[in-house]
């Protein structure tokens, strides 16, 4: 039996509305990140995040 993930929704927006919006925009998000522009932006974001995480680790 497959377990369902517990949804955490601390907003006043009904979960069914959030789910509907997510299903509507997901194809566009996936298409963007499959594009060259999206892949370049993701790579840049990932590098910045790794740098930030590295700086945080150095501060500890």
Image (cartoon, grey):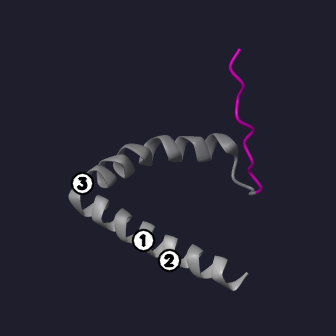
Instruction: Tell me which residue sits at (28%, 49%) in the image.
Output: 34
Whole-percent x and y of residue 57?
A: 65, 76
Q: Label 2, on which residue?
A: 51
Farthest-out residue, left: 36
Instruction: State the image quarter where residue 17 is shown.
Output: top right
- Left or right: residue 38 versus residue 26 is left
- Please say if 28 is above or below 41: above
Q: Does the segment drawn in magenta span residue 6?
A: yes
Instruction: Magenta stretch: give its range.
Output: 1-10
Q: Callout 1: helix, strand or loop?
A: helix
Tell me how far mark 2 sits from mark 1, CA to CA.
6 Å
Q: Main secondary structure of the magenta part?
A: loop
In terms of depth relative to the viewer, which is nearer, 34 or 8?
A: 34
Q: Nearer the viewer, mark 2 or mark 3?
A: 2
Q: Which residue is mark 1?
A: 47
Q: Position of residue 35 (x, y in %)?
A: 24, 54
Of the residues under marks 1 and 3, which one precedes in the sequence?
3
Q: Which residue is mark 3?
A: 35
The 10 Å Cα crowd at callout 3, few under 14, some 14 to 19, many 20 or more, is: few
Q: What residue is shown at x 36% (from left), y 71% (from top)? A: 44
Q: Position of residue 50 (x, y in %)?
A: 50, 70
Q: Residue 8's spot in the image, x, y percent? A: 75, 48
Q: Nearer the viewer, residue 4 or 18?
A: 4
What whole-number distance in Å separates the C-alpha atoms at marks 2 and 3? 24 Å
């Amino acid at each position: 039996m497959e377990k369902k993930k517990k949804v955490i929704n601390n907003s006043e927006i009904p979960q069914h509305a959030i789910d509907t919006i997510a299903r509507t925009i997901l194809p566009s998000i996936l298409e963007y990140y499959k594009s060259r522009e999206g892949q370049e932006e993701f790579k840049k974001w990932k590098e910045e995040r790794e740098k930030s995480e590295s700086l945080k680790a150095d501060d500890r």
